[in-house]
Image (spheres, grey):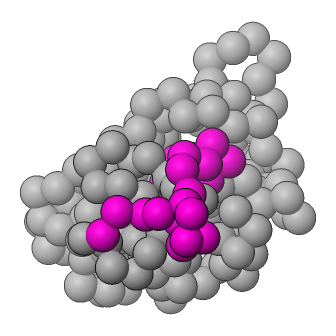
């Protein structure tokens, strides 16, 4: 967990994806997501515990991949108290016609839902659903949405609730919503319609 967590904190998305996908391919049994303590390099051979080259099921390892996948779509930065949405999703997830959808993901700031669809090569439609619990307060560092274009095109403009949104970093592919903006009346309605142009 620590290696992936460090990569996320440093915003090293490509390294994080390589680590996560390598773990999925080499550290887990295909199709069952069962994690072993260790395994032989030759996956065609049975692990023989008497030779010391393999062991059985490892419950702590079982939590690694689900945690990494959650961090792909929802990550809480402990330093800035920022809630990141889609911080490290693979670019192929937003190819034209594809949708990323996460419902009721847990965070210390309540359950968040998110959806993004690449409608054309130059436009992505997204929405973020905030918690509806009474007394909900936004994260101190706000929410940052990252939309990683499938061809690495830079953001040219973003509208939120039909109005141009100024808090956009084209290079980082991010749209920022400050705590103050999230606390205003009508913020939830605005976040239901986010349109990113490239």
Viewed as shown, does residue 53 lie left or right of 162? Answer: right
Q: Position of residue 127 (x, y in %)?
A: 40, 42
Q: Is residue 24 above or below residue 104?
A: below
Where does residue 195 sit, x and y in percent of width and height? 33, 56
- Pick the residue in front: 17 or 165: 17
Whether residue 102 is in magenta: the answer is: no
Q: Quadrant of residue 108?
A: top right
Residue at image position (47%, 63%) is 48
Name which residue lies at 75% across and 68% down.
2
* Residue occupying the point 26% across, 48% down: 31
**Would residue 83 be found to the left or right of residue 74 on screen?**
right
Q: Where is residue 173 shown, x and y percent of the image?
A: 47, 77
Q: Residue furthest right?
A: 79
In this rendering, does residue 162 appear at all?
Answer: no
The span shown in magenta is 45-71
| Magenta-span inclusion, residue 70 | yes
* Position of 51 relative to 80 (above/below): below
> Looking at the picture, does residue 173 appear above or below residue 182?
below
Quadrant of res 40? bottom left
Answer with left or right where residue 100 lies relative to residue 87.
Answer: left
Q: Is residue 179 something that shows in the picture? A: yes
On the rendered image, what quadrant is the C terminus found in? bottom left
Residue at the farthest front position: 50
In the rendered image of this protein, does residue 91 appear above or below residue 135?
below
């Amino acid at each position: 967990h620590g290696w992936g967590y460090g990569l996320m904190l440093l915003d090293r998305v490509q390294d994080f994806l390589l680590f996560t996908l390598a773990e999925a391919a080499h550290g887990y049994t295909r199709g069952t997501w069962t994690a072993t303590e260790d395994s032989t390099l030759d996956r065609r051979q049975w692990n023989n515990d008497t030779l010391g080259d393999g062991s059985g099921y490892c419950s702590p390892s079982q939590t690694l991949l689900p945690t990494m996948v959650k961090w792909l779509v929802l990550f809480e930065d402990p330093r800035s108290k920022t809630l990141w949405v889609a911080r490290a999703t693979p670019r192929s997830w937003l190819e034209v016609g594809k949708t990323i959808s996460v419902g009721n993901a847990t965070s210390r700031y309540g359950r968040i839902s998110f959806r993004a669809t690449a409608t054309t090569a130059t436009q992505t439609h997204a929405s973020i659903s905030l918690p509806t619990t009474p007394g909900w307060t936004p994260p101190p560092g706000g929410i940052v949405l990252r939309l990683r274009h499938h061809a690495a095109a830079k953001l040219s403009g973003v509208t939120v609730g039909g109005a141009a949104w100024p808090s956009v970093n084209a290079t980082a592919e991010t749209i920022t919503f400050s705590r103050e903006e999230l606390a205003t009346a009508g913020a939830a309605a605005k976040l239901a319609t986010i349109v990113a142009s490239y």
